[in-house]
Image: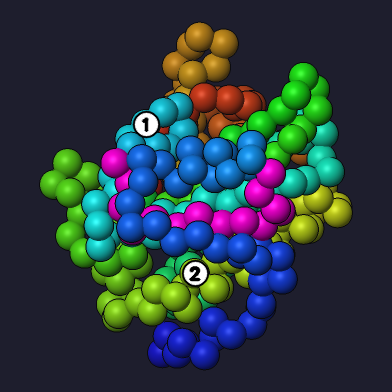
C-alpha cells in the first residue's frame, strides 16, 4: 500500500494546543523559553518553536543535537488540573500522540520507554516533560518534543538516529506535520487527564517497540532483560533470562538489541 498523501494531516485538528504560537529563529532551549513564559502567566496551550537550539536537552540533561534545518524543536505550556504526582506518566500519553503523528506520514514508528520514538531501532524523536510547582501544587507542565525532520545527522549520532524524511523516503511538509503533531498530542493529553493511565497503558503497549533487549539499573544493580510492556502504574517491565519480571520506574533504559521496531 502506498503511503498516504498530505491530506492525511487534516484530521484531527488541535483546539487548544498551539492556540498561541511563538516562532523563534534560535534560542538556548525551547523548554527553557516555555518555562519562562509559563512563569510569566502564558496561557494553556502556548507553543514555542525554534529553528535551532544552542542548548537543547533531553532526559537527565543529555544534549539534544539541534542544528538548523535538521529538526523540529517544540515546547508547550500545559496548565493541567492533575496533581503533581500524576505529571510524569503524561510522558507516555504525549509519546502516543507523537507516535501517531509520525505514523500518519507513513512511517511505522514505535515507542521506547519512557520517551523515545524509534524507526527500525534508530531514534527519530523524543519527549521531555518538566513540572513547575509551588510545594505540592502544580503550576504548569512544560512539554518538549524534538523530532528529526530532514538533513544529515551529526556524525556522532548518525548510526543511532534517523530523520522523518529519511525514514519516509519523501519530503516532509514541516507545517503540516506540526499541525498533525499538535492535534494528536492534544488528543492524548486530554484522554490522560480525563481517564488516567487505564486509557494510556493499552494504547502505549500497542505502539511499543517489540523484540527489544534492554539494560536498566534497578536498586543499584544492572539488569538485562526483554522489554515486556508496562505495569499498571506505567513502570516498564523487563523479563530476565529466568522469566521473572522486574519493574523499572525511573532512570535510563539502554536498548542493547533491536530485532524489530514495530508492533
Q: Quadrant of residue 65?
A: top left
Mark earlier in primary sequence (1, 2):
1
In the depicted structure, whether residue 8 falls above or below residue 197: below
In the depicted structure, whether residue 150 falls above or below residue 52: below
Q: Which residue is mark 1?
A: 62
Q: Position of residue 218 (x, y in %)?
A: 55, 17
Secondary structure of the residue carrying tag 1 is loop
Q: Position of residue 201 (x, y in %)?
A: 72, 49
Q: Position of residue 119 (x, y in %)?
A: 38, 59
Q: Which residue is mark 2?
A: 178
Spatial CA distance of label 1 from label 2 is 24 Å
Secondary structure of the residue carrying tag 2 is helix
Q: Residue furthest front?
A: 40
Q: Nearer the viewer, residue 40 or 68?
A: 40
**45 magenta-colored:** yes
Q: Nearer the viewer, mark 1 or mark 2?
A: 2
Give the extent of the magenta segment.
41-54
> Within 10 Å of the Cα at label 1, are there few (<14), some (14-19), or many (20+) other Cα atoms?
few
Q: Nearer the viewer, residue 137 or 252?
A: 137
The reply to whether discs 1 and 2 touch (Cβ–Cβ < 8 Å) is no
Relative horizontal placement of residue 89, taking residue 111 as reference (left or right): right
User: Residue at horizontal 52%, vertical 24%?
Assistant: 251
User: Residue at horizontal 75%, vertical 24%?
Assistant: 134
Number of marks present in the image shown: 2
Does residue 205 appear anywhere in the picture?
Answer: no
Q: Nearer the viewer, residue 215 or 167?
A: 167
Q: Nearer the viewer, residue 17 or 23?
A: 23
Amino acid at each position: 500500500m502506498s503511503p498516504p498523501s498530505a491530506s492525511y494531516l487534516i484530521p484531527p485538528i488541535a483546539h487548544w494546543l498551539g492556540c498561541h504560537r511563538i516562532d523563534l529563529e534560535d534560542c538556548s532551549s525551547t523548554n527553557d523559553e516555555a518555562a519562562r513564559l509559563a512563569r510569566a502567566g502564558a496561557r494553556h496551550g502556548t507553543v514555542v518553536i525554534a529553528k535551532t537550539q544552542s542548548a537543547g536537552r533531553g532526559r537527565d540533561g543529555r544534549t539534544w543535537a539541534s542544528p538548523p534545518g535538521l529538526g523540529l524543536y517544540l515546547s508547550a505550556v500545559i496548565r493541567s488540573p492533575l496533581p503533581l504526582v500524576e505529571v510524569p506518566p503524561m510522558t507516555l500519553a504525549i509519546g502516543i500522540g507523537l507516535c501517531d503523528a509520525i505514523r500518519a506520514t507513513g512511517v511505522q514508528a514505535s515507542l521506547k520507554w519512557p520517551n523515545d520514538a524509534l524507526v527500525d531501532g534508530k531514534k527519530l524523536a523524543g519527549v521531555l516533560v518538566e513540572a513547575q510547582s509551588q510545594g505540592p501544587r502544580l503550576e504548569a507542565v512544560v512539554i518538549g518534543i524534538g523530532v528529526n525532520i530532514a538533513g544529515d545527522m551529526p556524525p556522532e549520532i548518525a548510526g543511532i538516529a534517523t530523520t522523518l524524511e529519511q525514514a519516509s523516503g519523501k519530503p516532509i511538509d514541516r507545517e503540516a506535520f506540526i499541525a498533525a503533531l499538535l492535534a494528536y498530542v492534544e488528543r492524548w493529553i486530554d484522554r490522560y487527564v480525563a481517564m488516567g493511565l487505564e486509557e494510556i497503558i493499552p494504547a502505549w503497549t500497542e505502539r511499543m517497540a517489540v523484540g527489544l533487549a534492554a539494560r536498566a539499573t534497578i536498586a543499584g544493580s544492572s539488569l538485562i532483560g526483554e522489554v515486556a510492556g508496562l505495569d499498571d502504574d506505567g513502570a516498564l517491565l523487563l523479563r530476565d533470562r529466568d522469566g521473572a519480571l522486574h519493574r523499572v520506574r525511573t532512570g535510563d533504559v539502554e536498548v542493547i538489541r533491536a530485532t524489530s521496531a514495530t508492533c
